Amino acid sequence: MIENIENTIVAISTPPGKGGISVIRLSGKNSIDIVSKIFKGQKDIKNATPWKAVFGKIVDNEIEIDEVIAIVYKNPNSYTKEDMVEINCHGGRYISQKILEIVIQNGAQLAQPGEFTFRAFINGRIDLSQAESVADLINAQTEASRRASYFQLEGKLSTKITDVRNRLIDYCSLLELELDFPEEDIEFVDRTDFILKLKKSKEELENLISTYQIGRIAREGVKLVIVGRPNTGKSSLLNALIREDRAIVTDIPGTTRDSLEVQLDIKGILFRVFDTAGLKKANNIIEQEGIRRSRGHIESADIIVHVFDGSQIIRNGDYEIIDMIEQLNNRKVIRVINKIDLTQRIEKEKINFNKNPLLSISAMYGDGIDLLEEQLYKSVLNDKGNIFSDEVIVTNVRHWQILKKTLESLNKAIKETEKGISSEFVALYIRDALDYLAQITGKVTSEDILNNIFSNFCIGK
């Protein structure tokens, strides 16, 4: 993308398919000139008042293609800080594609995924963390993910990172100033006070890092895995949660042989729900693979819902699953007794332990499903804090990894200062921390990283 920064780019910014309106977007120094060649209205588009809609027609060799609305954005007051034009034509694949081809024939270049946002970043309108939040906001599926993305787009994370970085720059400057006068033996900063300041920055970084678990949930959702031995009603529970028949339900044990994933929004939190194959002794290679996948999902779950058949006594298969779950650390478990519409034979006291929530439901008739949803919602909030907080949270794994590296460098700087090591080595570690933080906002980053980030965007944004 960097080598094409001087070109004028164009893309269809609306999703493909039929719709009321399609938007074709141009950005670059020749945007207005290119559109003026194909736009016919009461006034030349070159003389149009910026940021106001102008009615006209798109023509190709004097052939009228469509009636459109065009809006001119003059630099630097545009999304990319370049001259931009947006053409609003009638929706439909053929019309928008035809206008796109005409624009390209008149000198524009087809934009790559994320190239408009890339230019906004390169031209200083937004930093890299804000640019990444644009894609997250587009992909947001719940209120939690929208809020987290929008706050990052507003620059809350950038502001926090910049504040920490500026203080570290000040500390490092004092140390390097000492190095400029080695023969004077002058100490520009009291070491005790300096350590306290570094520890304050360390605490801020640790607080940011600790928000990643809630940030990951806001961005990616909660992985919820439904487990149990065959025919306990796992698939029926999945269908009850999403209020539709997605999983096949029969009286034959082992109907589900593969894992089925659906998405569920509970009060603004995304739950990625997995219905797994019943855990038992496999009779064939297909069942073996299904059970292997089930175990994999259990090991990576955020929350496990263990389903029991209330109409039957506890069996060895139930205990085997309990033992498997107990071997996992830091896993939230909700135990559910299903089929309460039938005569109950289950011994509750044998499964009501370790303070795990125990609920009774009828997946077939929907009894208790609301209580289960409430418990799922509370499980996220109780473990992770307030997911809807206005506080700065880290949602991006790249940022999280960089912050951990920053913390490592800062810990080394503190340790060396406490040892009384030369300021030269302490300053080196702080410089490393500064470089890491700069990678979050994009002040320091490689072309490969930039290409990887923006290639995941949709075309036209």
Image (cartoon, grey):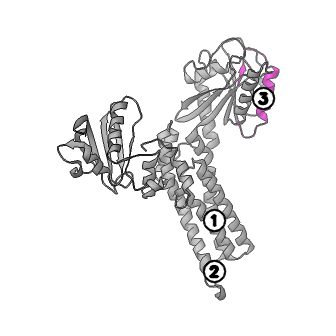
Residue 323 counted in the magenta span? yes
**Mark toward the start of the polypeptide (3 vs 1):** 3
- Which label was assigned to residue 322? 3
Residue 369 found in image quarter: top right
Q: Quick one: 105 or 85, which is closer to the camera?
A: 105
In the displayed structure, 339 sits above or below 264; it is above
Region in magenta: 306-331
Position above or below: 222 against 118: above
Dividing the picture into quarters, in which one does residue 81 lie? bottom left
Residue 92 visible here: no
- Amino acid type, callout 3: Ile
N-terminal label among 1 and 2:
2
- Name the residue tied to disc 1: 432
Please tell me whether mark 1 sits on a helix, a strand or a loop: helix
Given residues 257 and 241, the one toward you in this image is 257
- Report whether residue 253 is seen: yes
